[in-house]
Image (spheres, coloured by chain):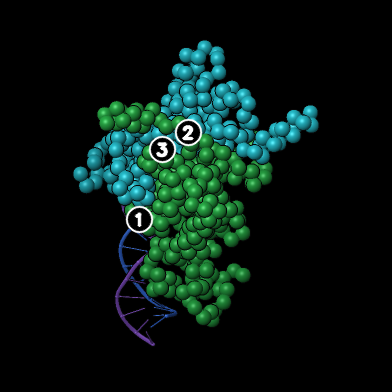
Chain colours: A cyan, B green, C purple, D blue
Amino acid sequence: MSEATAKQGPDTRARILNAAESLFMTHGFEATSMRMITGQAGVNLAAVNYHFGSKDALIQEVFKRRLTELNRDRLSALEAEEALANGAPLKPSKIVAAFFGVSLKMAADTEHGGATFMRLLGRTYTEPNEFVRQFLAEEYAEVVQRFMSALYRALPDVPREEILWRFHFMMGAMSYAIAGTDALKLFAGDFDDKDPTRLMPRLMSFLLGGLRAPLPEEVVESRTSRRDAA
Amino acid sequence: MSEATAKQGPDTRARILNAAESLFMTHGFEATSMRMITGQAGVNLAAVNYHFGSKDALIQEVFKRRLTELNRDRLSALEAEEALANGAPLKPSKIVAAFFGVSLKMAADTEHGGATFMRLLGRTYTEPNEFVRQFLAEEYAEVVQRFMSALYRALPDVPREEILWRFHFMMGAMSYAIAGTDALKLFAGDFDDKDPTRLMPRLMSFLLGGLRAPLPEEVVESRTSRRDAA
DNA sequence: GTCTATACGACGATAGAC
DNA sequence: GTCTATCGTCGTATAGAC
């Protein structure tokens, strides 16, 4: 159990990916060394750089696998709602539920590392590193565009820039929701962990309240004055 | 300007702290090496470990200085509102503005590294590291308790556990708001950076909408059934 | 093409001389 | 208190064996 799970595995590349994913999700990216990965995979240290180029590239590959799946599920959820609506604009609650419901579902999967992955994903958004953010942008481009279009239709009176910002805020709230109970316990020692299924309705109420909140005065003013000018 | 700002500075400890703060806020904690710090401070490499014990301890010291100041300002803002209210419960908007207004103000200070600090602070909440979270809990204990008390009074009909969660969600939204425009640009290439002073009203609308949103059904149900049982 | 052995420079940390 | 020398580990690069 200590190391070298299997010595004559068929695909070195796959063994590295599996070992890396498992270790990353358990210890985080930084705390996982190349020597830990290659040790567990039973391959030579240099194999990682040969197959992936660098540790960062390996991280990206592991990340990509999960993120692609996650975004596919998010799009499926949105499309399912759109099919039901039959061309009519979706209710904001349906759109938000499609995006964040799928996210929380993966976050609830503690067995396959989904929870750890979602925590890492939340942190990655605020990563100062340039190429990480750019990679994330590419992965998100399609799904964000689709969800934004749905929201534009659902909220025709809200300026698009405002919707974009509020979606951004919602992602932040979700990130903390997933990072979760641990952080909350710090603030309230008597805090009960309770049923994690309550998180979803809790978060949904908050997100919808924020999304449909009255527009900030400055935006209202600028819209009013624009209307006045016209 | 390259290194060794002053060779015969009086207080080695202070010179290390200043150099560390400057470098941390510019490059982040991890990207700043001990050799960079001691080089800029004009002291020996081993001096950091002698005076602070470790790099982590030095990070805590620098972090603490900022966070103490930030939380002091947040409490001052709350107390100023409470003085105006003369014993009456504060409006939720005043409470939220006190906490997050001060935060955004520090985040807007790009000159002294306030922006970088706030970005790092936002990430630190979701840090899996145990002692980092415990340190943060101690630093936040008083200010969170005070703000929660104010919110309990302001929203007597909302279950306290719900308020706690929503405050947590608000912190997440703020964290992403500060991490900011860079992340947003990734999703919308045509996105305009615009006036950063608009961020505050934008965020405030969202936060208040979320804070005052209708309670999730499950919470309402459990409260109703509890009332029924009584 | 794959893979291994080995070495390189930078990192945080520490023991011991002054 | 401060310094030098050195330790073990890190990610990475490369020469050469299969």
Residue under circle 3? Answer: B158
Front-most of residues A144 and A221: A221
The residue lying furthest to the left in this view is A1
Q: Is residue A138 left or right of residue A186?
A: right
Q: Position of residue A78 (x, y in %)?
A: 48, 22
Mark 3: which amino acid?
Val
Q: Is residue B137 left or right of residue B195?
A: left
Q: Is residue B2 left or right of residue B156?
A: right
Front-most of residues C2 and A68: A68
| Residue A69 seen | no
Q: Position of residue A81 (x, y in %)?
A: 47, 18
Front-most of residues C14 and B9: B9
**Mark 2 falls on what kind of element?**
loop
Q: Nearer the viewer, mark 2 or mark 3?
A: 3
Q: Is residue A69 above or below residue A171?
A: above
- The numbered mark at residue B134 is 1
**Mark 3 falls on what kind of element?**
loop
* Contact? badges 2 and 1 (CB < 8 Å): no
Residue shown at the point (62%, 24%) measured from the top left: A156
Residue under circle 2? Answer: B213
Tell me where residue C14 sits by quadrant: bottom left
Mark 1: which amino acid?
Gln
